[in-house]
Image: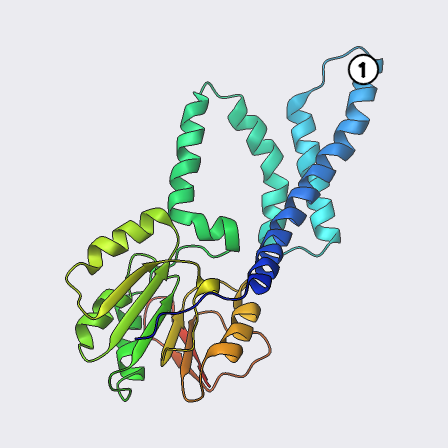
Amino acid sequence: MPSPSPEPDTDLQQHASQQRSPLLRQLTLQCAAAFAVLSLAWPYFGIRNETLPWPATALAIGGAALLLASLLHQAWWWRLIHALFAPLAWGVASLPINPDWFLLAFVLLLLVYRGAITGQIPLYLSNRDTVAALVELTSERSGMLFLDLGAGIGSVLRPLAKARRDARFTGVENAPATWIVGYLRMIGQANCDWRWGDIWRTNLAGYDVVYAFLSPAPMPELWQKVIREMRPGSLFISNSFAVPEVEPSDVLTIADARHTRLYCYQR
């Protein structure tokens, strides 16, 4: 199987900039709310020679952040985050907890959810019903080359590799903790290649089927990558998240608890 080659440096830089922009916008919005409230509260209470009431100030910052997020038409969950961030930060800071525990929690979350921080791609695990559906979808592709982008702990690749001994499977993951778990699970799977890597650096040209279970955020850009790199006749499958404004060639609804949908795009 040919070894995937990196994307051009210019494309990588552009992608990195695009991924940082949403996070910077949210941080800027929260900082603007804090600045607006504190620029009024500090002079007011300073003139009165009174101590700044931090609980009320934190609530005011949350309210200001919620107002700004609403005016900017942020998603509802971003509005909730902005409204609760300052009050929760003040509340937690007032607790008698050793700061080292916060550092440990941050490191552990980063090891598992690195994709959510750097690319708005959280960890999702595919279930057995999804794997069975993928086996059926790819049954006519003898000797296929299958790629899982953001493979997590191998919840798709491991059972697929066992079910399709004739095929070759590659998983790409860049969250340290989940990559290690997946690596250990893939030991002994001769037809599975488990890789540490960035999905944006992974060339899709050599694969018959590319599978992704990511989030709505990267889908438009990922689709452009699919168009550029996947060859005619290949198949792109997205779990749960459709490509915006692109009609799938097929949509398979799985009879599981959350009625998972697999959006299939034939190249």
Residue type at tag 1: Gly
Q: Is residue 26 left or right of residue 233?
A: right
Q: Is residue 64 above or below residue 178?
A: above
Q: Is residue 245 left or right of residue 31?
A: left
> In which quadrant of the rendered view does residue 109 lie?
top left
Instruction: State the residue in front, 171 or 266.
Output: 171
Q: Is residue 104 above or below residue 264?
A: above
Q: Is residue 263 above or below residue 21?
A: below
Q: Does residue 243 appear in this view?
A: no
Q: Which residue sits furthest right?
A: 47
**Residue at point 53%, 21% (across, down):** 94
Residue 196, given in percent of the width and then of the height, sits at: 35, 56
> In which quadrant of the rendered view does residue 111 lie?
top left
Q: Is residue 219 above or below residue 141?
A: above
**Residue at point 54%, 66% (across, down):** 8
Q: Does residue 88 appear in this view?
A: yes
Instruction: State the residue in front, 47 or 31.
Output: 31
**Residue at point 23%, 65% (across, down):** 158
**Residue at point 45%, 80% (across, down):** 230
Residue 246, given in percent of the width and then of the height, sits at: 56, 80
Q: Which residue sits furthest left?
A: 188
Q: Residues within 10 Å of mark 1 (few under 14, many from 20)?
A: few
Label 1: element kind? helix
Q: Look at the image and tell me in which quarter the N terminus lies.
A: bottom left
Instruction: State the residue in front, 24 or 167.
Output: 167
Residue identified by numbered label 1: 46
Residue 155, given in percent of the width and then of the height, sits at: 28, 62
